[in-house]
Image (tube, helix red, strand yellow):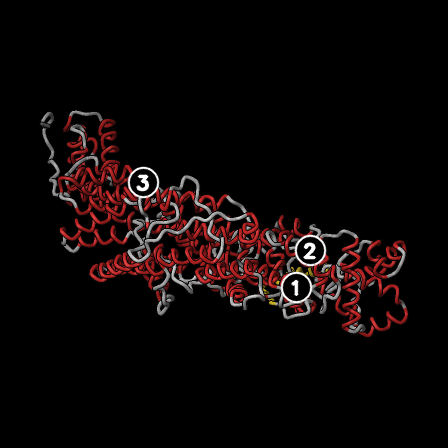
Amino acid sequence: MVVLDPPGHSSMATVTHHVSTAYGREANVRRVGCLPEAAGTEHAVLRRLLGAPPAGHGARYAPHTVVCGLLARGPLVLAIDDAQWCDEGTLRFIDELMRSSHHETLTVLLHLPRGVPTPAAAAFHELATRDYCTVVDPGSPRPAGTTAPASEDVAELARREPRLLAVARAAAALHSTEPDLVGALAGLPSQTADRLLEEAGTRGLLPGPLPAHGTRLLWDTLSESERQRWYAQAAEILNDAAAPVEQVADLLLEQSRLDRPWMRTVLREAAAASRHHRPAAAVAYLTRLHAADTEDASVRLDLAEALVDIDPSAARGHLAHLADAPSGTVDRPVREHAAGLLRLVALMLHESPDGPAALGTLLRRTAAGGPDVPPAGPGARGTGTTAAAAGPSSSTPVPATPLSATARDLTRPTEHLLLAARALRTALTADGHEAREAAVADARRVIWSGRPHTAWAVVAAARVLTLADDTATALDHLQRIVADSAEREELWAESHAASVRAQVLVEAGRAAEAAEAAAAASRLAEAEGTTGGGPLATIALVRALVARGDLDRAQEALRRIDGRRLDDCVWEHHHHLTALALFERGRGRPEQALRLLERCGASLDAAGVRNPVLTLWWLHSTELLMLLDRPGDAARRAEHGQELAERWLTPRSMGLGLLARGMAAGPRDRVELFTESARVLAQSSDRHAHALAELHLGKELLRRSDRGAQPRLRAALATAARCGLVTVADEARRALRSAADRHAPAALSQAERPVAELAAAGKSNRAIADSLCLTARTVEYHLTNVYRKLGVTGRAGLTKWFAAHRSQPASARAPGGVS
């Protein structure tokens, strides 16, 4: 609503209070005033209103996330005073938000004093013409020309004009002003209803721009049972009129009793219809059904499945009730399915370990309890398809039991979860080329199979694809899950996918994007109070900040994880140890960093994780061992990394293995190993590793005074700068300066060098021309090239350069004296 006020007066407080109380329950009100000096700053008001980040890549994503989080907790009112100074970016965000949130309990108020210049922002005029926008009179929170009824007015209206009140109540109950429907509910002919609807709108008896619950005064003179009777009749009329089933079900949510068979049928159909595009609504319908009959196991199971991506903790409670139900009270297929899904939900909530051994046990237990294990993926062969052994104690293969047609209808969501769990287990154990192909095949089946499935399954599949060096596909699907989950109000899923996406960006070496994505994911997890991302977003933020050289902020982020128990979480625990190690190295404490990395490697080995690219602990420790002058240990660590890489043949793993071997190799072999590493890593998704390979190769060539060093160092600098890898870029710049210092004198031609020396000695262009028998124009030409090659400006810079390089400028020579 646009609220117009006379100069010097503001009714925004009154309007805001009326709107917030009209929802029938406490609303969250956020109110800010616009400032003239910030009118031209993009998203200035939005940042103050929602705490959104500055304009950039996440400027649109983060505000939508915040709004979704606020709406999940209840009605929301956004109030903006002096909107004539509101910036264009904020207004366009509001327009986009209102057009996509028509089902939400959201109201936006824009205060505009009369007499001020008309807002110049084109977005304001576009917004004001939208159907959802209404101009409100300053004296009343109703559209201009109407008055809001007080409770005593309603009582008087019921006595004097009962038909008008009946039409208003019918319109409010139906959320419609269709004369035929309103007349049917009010018991009046449609022509009469049409006339009375127009009068009701004029007299302010219809909702107008206010939320649906803003008409609660219409019901004040009715008892609760009478009000429910109105809503029940409205639902029945809409149902008979073939209205959308969800519209009918929304009215049934108001009923304290579902005493007619058709009501439960409608709620079931509405839950099924909204399950995939409005899961939060499906949860509301199923919750109402469950409250009506807590013994209905099928409703409880449907409710648990709908809650998995929204609130897995609540889903766990329903699943535990079904899984533990006494024999005979719940059908065995339902009980077994609930038990299998319960184990997977415990995995999602980090209440059970997620290492290869634990995943193998979960898959075998589910197979033993019922036909929940999915069939083998395409191209799978024998036991290698199901997953390799996680360790000596878990070598039994997971059976690949096909689903029966009946069981498939019941367990298909669980099928996707188990397929993703199997892909993860196979990828973590990394038992050769066939295992990698099987893991990727399972992951792709999960991603491309379509719904129904849970976000956890797709995120797990994306993790497998990342390990398999298909980061582009993984990031694409993770971004889709984040956006889809935000739109569907799946709070846990959105937080979980956003955190994993940030981690994948870190592993791809895209530090700038990773830092922004991790910060947004951390804010999302904190705002929602969910465990979807857990500490993973913070760990990703630490890694990105270390890569960017921002160690102080990295230390602040690490403090947020202190005291968290992560031992049972393969991903969080080992990425945390790696982040700590890289932070310690950045602080100049290599011994502490090495101890953390070796602890990480020992823990991964104990957990049965053999995938070489999960944390790269072996690569980082190889470099540290060389730094600590332990070449023998470094060589053995590099060989261990190479063995791991050969178990998981991807360009990234093989390139990293070559890079580690190059770090630990003798001077004779380094160039060859670094050259091959850079070539292979150029084909991978890991930009950080590729930049490192180019950097090491350039520095090695520089040690040999090879002129090929500079192109390699420039390639490392370009990649690092593009990806925000500040520490790598800084090291490449230092090496390039060293290369320039070493090779610059030789880079001057035989004609340029004497000109440069005489200019550095203070000779004028004319004197140099006379000494060398050149024209003044030729001298100027040579000096321009000299300045460019040496990176100096003017004679003073040239003199300093020769002094720094201990090269004595030539004194004035007689004509023809140049040798």
Could you tell me the amino acid type at mark 1?
Answer: Leu
Most foreground residue, 454 or 151: 454
Left or right side of 166 for 658: left
Left or right side of 132 for 513: left
Residue 681 in picture, x, y percent from top left: 30, 40
Most foreground residue, 580 or 531: 531
> From the viewer's perspective, is the residue at label 1 or at label 2 nearer?
1
Report crowding for label 3: few under 14, some 14 to 19, many 20 or more residues within 10 A (C-alpha).
Answer: many
x 32%, y 41%: residue: 433
Q: Secondary structure at mark 1?
A: helix
> From the viewer's perspective, is the residue at label 1 or at label 3 nearer?
1
x 57%, y 50%: residue: 406
Q: Which label is found at residue 289?
A: 1
x 39%, y 50%: residue: 505
Residue 524 in sight in this render = no
- Nearer-N-terminus badge (1/3): 1
Could you tell me the amino acid type at mark 3?
Answer: Pro
Most foreground residue, 178 or 376: 376
Q: Quadrant of the N terminus?
A: bottom right
Residue beneath disc 2: 246
Q: Secondary structure at mark 2?
A: helix
Q: Which label is found at residue 464?
A: none
Q: Secondary structure at mark 3?
A: helix
Q: Which label is found at residue 651?
A: 3
On the image, which quarter does residue 293 sit in?
Answer: bottom right
Could you tell me the amino acid type at mark 2?
Answer: Glu
- Nearer-N-terminus badge (1/2): 2
x 85%, y 57%: residue: 183
On the image, which quarter does residue 295 sit in?
Answer: bottom right
Residue 699 in sight in this render = yes
